[in-house]
Amino acid sequence: MLRFILQRLLWVPPTLIAISVVAFAIINLPPGDYVDRYALQAAAQGDVMTEAQKEALRITYGLDAPIPVQYVRWMSDMLLHGNFGWSFQHSRPVAEVIGERLGLTAILSIVTLTVTWMIAIPIGIYSAVRRYSIADYVFTSLGFFGLALPNFLLALALMYALFVFTGQSVGGLFSSQYADAPWSLGKVLDLLAHLWIPILVLGISGMASIIRTIRANLLDELRAPYLSAARAKGLPETWALLKYPVRHAMNPFVSGLNDVFVHIISGETIVAIVLGLETTGPLLFDALRNQDMFLAATLIMFLGILGMIGTLFSDVLLAWLDPRIRRQFTLVERRA
Amino acid sequence: MVAIDALSADVAPPAQSPASAVWRRFRRHRLGLAGLWITVLLYVATIFVEILSPQAPDAYSTRYAYYPPQAIHLFRDGRFEPHVLGYKVQFDYASGTRSFVADPRAVVPLGLWVKGDEYRWLGLIPANRHLLGPVDPRQRVFFAGADRLGRDVLSRTIYAARVSMTIGLAGVALSLVLGVAIGGISGYAGGMTDQVIQRFIEFLQSLPSIPLWIGFAAAIPKDTPPLQTYFLISLVLSMLGWTGLARVVRGRFLAMKEEEFIKAAKLDGCSTMRILFRHMLPCFYSHIIAVITLAIPAMILAETSLSFLGIGLKAPVISWGVLLQEIQNIRSMYTAPWLFLPGAVVVFAVLALNFLGDGLRDAADPHGS
Amino acid sequence: MAEVLHDTPFLEVRDLHVSFAEGDRQFTALDGVSFQVRRGRTLCLVGESGCGKSLTAKAILQVMGDNARIGQGGIWLCRDGRESIDIAALDPRGSAIRSIRGNDIAMIYQEPMSALSPLYTIGDQISEVLRWHGNTSRSEAREEAIAVLRAVGMPAPEKRFDAYSFELSGGQRQRAMIAMALVGRPQLLIADEPTTALDVTTQAVILDLLRERQQAQGMAMLFITHDLGVVSEVADDVAVMYMGRIVESGPVAEVLSDPRHPYTRGLLASRPSVTGRRRDRLETIPGTVPHLHNRPSGCAFFARCGHRRPGECDRQAPPPRQLAEARQAACWALDDEGHLQAAETHAPAVARRKPDYTCPPLLKVRGLKKHFLQGGGLFTKPRRVRSLDGVSFDIWPGETLGLVGESGCGKSTLGQTVIGLHKPSEGKVFLSNKGHDVDLAALPPAARRRHWRDIRMVFQDPNGSFNPRLTVYDILAEVLSVAGESRPAIASRVHEVMRMVGLDTAYLDRHAHAFSGGQRQRIGIARALASRPRLIIADEPVSALDVSVQAQILNLLRDLQAELGLSYLFISHDLSVVRHISDRVAVMYAGQVVELAPTEELFSAPRHPYTRALLNSVLEPTVARRTERQRLAGSVPDPAAFPEGCRFHPRCSLASDECRRTPPPLAASGSGRDVACFHPLPAAVPVRLLEPA
């Protein structure tokens, strides 16, 4: 087991380097750089920058060097000094910009995930076991709708409905009076009052796919002879179902968990933009659009790391759940 | 001739090809069948958008800004005379808002196959006939209301179908070529080639997809001509789609390589190419069709989301995502909820395609893969 | 004896009807099944696949699946000192049936690999029976489960308790499955084809075990099998099923020695024998078991029956007729005494052609080796699996060489390496071509392709060996069109081979999956014949087929050989089939040939201890049950780690120090027999006397 994890960890550094290169490449794909964008914006406000001014700005930001050099500088700063670079847009260190949004993002995503799983997994199980029941039809059709409805549209529709029924315009995670206030009980309650909308929006589409996956997996497992054998042993129906087919059906689900952490950080980008949430998704979006290079690159790196942690997490979880995988590695160890 | 046991007792084999078996199973799938008809209708509609829409999509008039939807009345004074009623604009000077009140005297008679805005059908044939519209070509009707520039939402939604429904096809076609070719090579060659391709796909899949998407889309210069943007966006979409398809194809190839009928083909003296194209590929046509049918709605949703964010297709191109940008402005959403129409159509089209794909998949693979 | 008969049956199934719902339609699967299972006795349900045997077993425990429904009839369970209950009337999810399952009635499934979950240890799955049925503590349950594992002969039961099913060998897995059924001390054990997936040597051991446990616990047993040999080994009573009905039943000796129903007769006659007279042709039951969707009216066996009386049999299904005490048969063709009128058999004998050993061999295989590298990663060395390890033999024109051995002995790899699907690691494959030998193994692929027409293959799986997208015409024509023959030539050859295998050329535009299993195997043979080959390698060509269909295919192969002078390399695990069809037989063990001899000599007087053990394990539907037999312990060695010396020595009772050190060479020991053994059995003394024909 340990060896298996170590073997996985060995792949992390090369993959990270590859991801960082790709991240840098993506950002530099559009023509021009941040200074060009900045000059464009300035020009729109009637403030024309000279070439010399632009060049000076480039030198301050270190954008004058060739891209590979910029890359090496950024990497070495990061590895040697823990310095992730400077956000041009926000005029602050990247670490700070990301840091202040991370907590909220994590809360939102973890709550959403928990709620989604707690509701969707039992529904998926029920739907498979009571196939073709009325409830199954209802859940299945809801699932189809959940998949067909882009979640930004759901968010907009929900906002509209709330506007019509309550006359209030909703958006953001805090009411205006709490937005910059320090944390207090009131602020927490206010957060909860706002949190349910993104959770609902994000949850519905997530649930739809989880219900479908679990239902499909379980339907296959319900045909397996070990369920029949468990029944023939005289186990109670519910126990037999939970112990055998449900547990088996969780395996493909767990192996699909690899991008769960990536999802936590970036899955809700569009919804967050629509709902005006101060999470990392919109941050990344703006950084990419405005070529705020180091902010974008750091965020992508961060996502890459989370992706790998997620894969490792789901692999280890799978090995823990499935003795076939576990024993395979101990066998290899014993032989080696 | 050799003496042979009588086979009289054997039941004659039914004359049924695998394709017809798939079709027979599919026909039992009612939702799938409904999805098929709706999908066919939608794609046929994309050919006739100019005729189906009552107005030109870019005809604007500030007079009609946020003009609400007009309901069709079939009878007037007890006689069959389809018409809509115009609106009177009332200003509430106290609050500074404008409101529309139906005017029973402003009758706009409707007709079929009426003259209206000029257009070139499919960009080629000049014409001015519309399936449904006001009898008097100088009048305007808004069955689904108007947007902030007074353009007809219904006409624009119909026109958008052409772009949105086909961009999925283009994206899928591209990812299909990439996926089948690369997945096929990987699965058939096996060994080192397979390993390299698999690591590469894994790497691509491990890249966080959303920034990749945004990054590529943002990389398209703002002044790219519409048609080129269309193809670039479909390229971006297919770059995300092909890895999944390649894995499916590879898995199938790997499994099939061990099948006895492939060994039999080898023993028949078939070359590798013949085995690939005559014996292996046809065996998962139906599976591939199901997979791509399910990929099209995903691409439609992706296009809608990208365009909505302003990094996909851009005006003057008309797509559902572009139209939905109108409601990014919360205020216009509140005043003109009919701007949701393109969104509803997206859901409808995606549902139909999903039902169709699901039905096809079940029919192609009755026992699950 | 009288006491047993008067004892009330433990389980009585009366007029049981079960139907399947498919869409809006209902299909009858069990059509009035009645039988009794008595304490301490074994009832065998026997029949071909699709006859409803397994469904009957599942109906008894009410674990049939959601779309099956018991229509009418009862399943009466009579436990000691308690009143009888009708299981059929119980709620399949209720607590009443649950207290019966695993407790009064337990079941052994056909495939332990899929009936045991790989996610839990076998100990967990065995002891949970106790934990749910009694107030047994975890440690007590463990103790008891280990005791049962020991009782079923599981080696190191304390250790195996914590093993997973995928870590056990096939035989051990089946032992675990049996332990799981026995641990609740059931009074009725249902065994659904418990040995079908096992090798003959393991099968014999498992059957011994089941019988021993039955006697020790005084259980009743309902044993389901398609194999009449197994029936004669385990049954007290037998019930023959056909299409959801019991067509004949009675004590095993009477039914096997004096079958009354045409179906029972057909089953017995179509089975080749290891000990009996060697027949040139097997009698067959024409056709196959119809699908449930096409249940005929009247007697379900009508269309396949040699005794049928049109106008009578196809009108009404025959009711069971009492022939003697505890003996029934359901057939209209029985006379007043309950005997079947003789019917003319339609199996014209074809003169058998003897292979000509004077001319040079058609195929010479010399020192053939095939090693596979398996696994291996960043940190591990790949395993070298020695599937074939130095095999040599000849095949003469017109000869059939049978190749037998347990699963994993390398016999399939041998066939595939000879034909060129695998590149041999070492060794030569000479094909005689116009007077001189060509070494196929040394040819580059392009040159080799020219010889593919001379050697053809018939595959085991009649489902998987045809491209589902191609029509039968395309399948048969493929080899010819690849060779570039003209369209008319292809068409005439395709029609010709189709007729040769006895299929109607009108079906050429159909797809292979539309045919029945037997018909598909005919198409497979036709495909092999299309290129006018000289040698056909048949890899388990009949083992996926029901016994009646198997006989049809064996006859066809025999006829074609006589007609065309073909040579066969016939690979099979089934010794009776190999004996029937082969001129000479090679026995393989652990990648090597251990004995090669003319068929009759090998079967009457095996010289290698392994051959003898194999023969000892074969079960035959004979009346007299064989008494003491030696069982072969242990299992086939891991092909990546063969034992030193003779590879058979760990399982051999005759093994000496020499056997442990040096591998014995395959040496000629007179009369055309080769044996690889330092202590061969004497050639003169047969293991058992041949029964009179």
Image: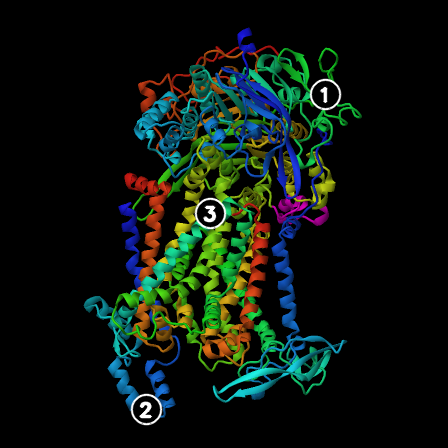
The reply to whether discs 3 and 1 touch (Cβ–Cβ < 8 Å) is no
Q: Residue at x 46, y 76 (%)?
A: B328
Category of crowding for the residue at label 2, using alpha-carbon neighbours closer than 10 angstroms: few (below 14), some (14–19), many (at least 20): some
Residue shown at 36% from the left, 90% from the top: A45
Residue A85 position, x and y percent, is 25, 73
* Circle 1 residue: C345
Q: Position of residue C507 (x, y in %)?
A: 71, 41
Mark nearest the camera among 2 and 1 is: 2
Q: Which mark is residue A125?
A: 3
Q: Is residue C100 above or below residue C499?
A: above
- Label 1 SS: loop
Query: Can you tell which of label 3 and label 2 is closer to the viewer?
Result: 3
Q: Nearer the viewer, mark 3 or mark 1?
A: 3
Name the residue beneath numbered marker 2. Answer: A49
Which residues, given as a range, are shown in magenta? Answer: C468-489
Label 2 – label 1 distance at C-alpha: 106 Å
Q: Which residue lies at the image location 73% right of the left edge and 43% below the top edge?
A: C492
